[in-house]
Structures are given as structure tokens and as C-alpha cells.
Amino acid sequence: MPETHPPQDFAGLSLSDIAALGAQNKLPPVDQWNPAHCGDSQMRIASDGTWFHEGSPIGRLAMVRLFSTILRREPDGGYVLVTPAEKLSIEVDDAPFVAVELKSEGAGESRRLAFRLNTGDLVIADGDHPLRVVDKPDGPHPYVAVRKGLDALIARPVYYELVNLALEEDLATPGLWSEGHFFALEAQ
């Protein structure tokens, strides 16, 4: 089961520390569980990352973390909470996670980018966790892939940090490298 408390000082951690913490984050094998669909969980994840149950926000981070570990994206694009015994639908307004903090080390092609999510999870941008920007009517929506079809919306202040780093790089295509992969910060 994942740790229920996020690191106290994300900014003070090295990316090697962050990678080690991420590797320790053991998640249930939700992709191997295939129970029958039981109905609606009466839960919703708002676009700001707030989890609701029957219209009321879930205030305990430990509960949100627990539920986030059994969240899965279905082939039809829907989201479910799944255990070995049951599967319940959950409504997701935009993305199930929000990247709320950024850590950058290095520059150019040797740069590494790490994100802390609103659930305390840690993600390093790489080939398995790419960054992408989607143009929507209300402006660009930047995302980082978290796991198996689950994304984190990158919070606006974190996106501005990324853009500032990209402007400092002064490349022909605005973007950043992380773990040897280039990620354009333009809408796709």
C-alpha cells in the first residue's frame, strides 16, 4: 500500500531521492482485477483535484490516497474504482490527478523534471510519463502521464514554471528535456 503522507520537503529532495521514493510506491494490481461492474460510486474528481462523495468533498488526504490507488481507466475512456470483488464508476471532470509542484535538475538534454501530485505521488517525466499540452476552448491544458491511462493536469503555476524553464533554454520549439526525452510545450 502506498505511503499516505507526501514528502514534507519536495524542494529539498534530489531527483535521485524522488526516483527512489517513486520506486517504493507499490500499487495494487488493478489491471489484473476484473470483477463485474457494480454501479456508481457516487464519487467525482473535480478539475482542481478535489475528490467528492455524494456531493461533499473528501477532506482526509489518506482517504483520497487510498481511493487513488484503486483508480483505473477503462478501455472506453471511463474511470472506475476497482477491487478484486467490485468495480464502481467514478466521474472525472478533467484528469484524476493534479501536478502541484515541480522539481528540475540539470539543463538541456540532461535535465530531469519531477512532479509531486495532489495525492502525494511522485512522477518523473520520461518516456513512460510524457508531458503533453492539449488546446481546449479555455486555453492550453498541460498534462503528465501518471500510470496506465491516468494523467495529472499540471497546475497553472507549475505550468508557468515549465514555460519559464523552456524560455531560458531558447530552443526553436518551446519545450523541455527530461530523462533523455524532449517534450514540446505547444498544444497538440
Image (cartoon, grey):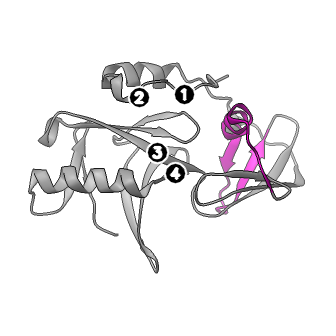
Q: Secondary structure at mark 3?
A: strand
Q: Do the residues bearing badges 2 and 4 touch, measured as CB atoms within 8 Å? A: no
Query: Magenta residues?
Result: 56-82
Q: Secondary structure at mark 4?
A: strand
Alpha carbon distance from label 1 to label 4:
18 Å
- Could you tell which of marks 3 and 1 lies nearer the N-terminus? 1
Q: Quadrant of residue 79?
A: bottom right
Residue 115 horizontal/vertical position (percent): 41, 39
Quadrant where the N terminus lies?
top right
Alpha carbon distance from label 2 to label 4:
20 Å
Q: Which residue is mark 3?
A: 100
Can you tell which of label 1 and label 4 is closer to the viewer?
A: 1
Q: Nearer the viewer, residue 25 or 7?
A: 7
Q: What amino acid type should be assigned to the residue bearing mark 2? A: Phe
Q: Do the residues bearing badges 4 and 3 touch, measured as CB atoms within 8 Å? A: no
Q: Is residue 160 magenta?
A: no
- Could you tell which of marks 2 and 3 lies nearer the N-terminus? 2
Q: Is residue 78 magenta?
A: yes
Residue 120 horizontal/vertical position (percent): 55, 33
Alpha carbon distance from label 4 to label 3:
13 Å
Quadrant where the C terminus lies?
bottom left
Q: Which residue is mark 2?
A: 10
